[in-house]
Image (cartoon, rainbow, N blue to C red):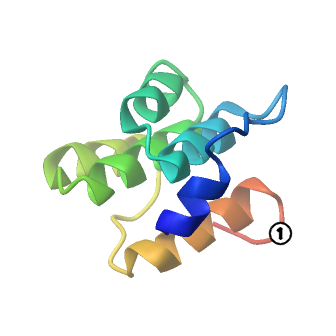
Amino acid sequence: MADFRASLADAAPAPGLQPPLAALWWAAKGDWDRAHKIVQDESDANAAWVHAYLHRVEGDLGNAGYWYRQAGQPVAKDSLEAEWERIVSALLGGGKA
């Protein structure tokens, strides 16, 4: 993951990127505060799902559970990597949540 983050060092997210995808982009870059700020005020289920994932990665399971419920998603029991892939796939339209 460190090599991936290093490859993003001078990059910026694409203009017009959906807030949940932009939040995941910043999280991948390691800027968790910025990722949270992007999705915390969004009202759609995808933003809530990403917000839940961010809290889960940080080990804040109480807040993660709250945001999963806001998203209408079951609390994730799979690995963080599988959850990441499931979210990205759903947001990009390549899979079902």
Residue positioned 53% across, 53% down in the render = 28
Residue positioned 74% across, 36% down in the render = 13
Quarter of the C terminus within the rendering: bottom right
Rendered position, 16 above or below 47: above
Comparing 30 with 92, the one in front is 30
Q: Which residue is under mark 1? A: 94
Quarter residue 95 falls in: bottom right
Quarter residue 44 falls in: top right
Instruction: Residue 71: tell me if it is visible.
Output: no
Residue positioned 46% across, 27% down in the render = 34
Instruction: Residue 88: tell me if it is visible.
Output: yes
Pointer 1: residues within 10 angstroms few (<14), some, or many (20+)? few
Q: Secondary structure at mark 1?
A: loop
Q: Is residue 20 left or right of residue 62?
A: right
Rendered position, 62 above or below 19: below
Dot 1 amino acid type: Gly
Residue positioned 42% across, 41% down in the render = 51
Q: Is residue 63 left or right of residue 96?
A: left
Q: Position of residue 33 (x, y in %)?
A: 37, 29
Rendered position, 55 above or below 7: above
Q: Position of residue 3 (x, y in %)?
A: 56, 67
Comparing 23 with 46, the one in front is 23
Q: Position of residue 71 (x, y in %)?
A: 47, 45
Count of residue discs: 1
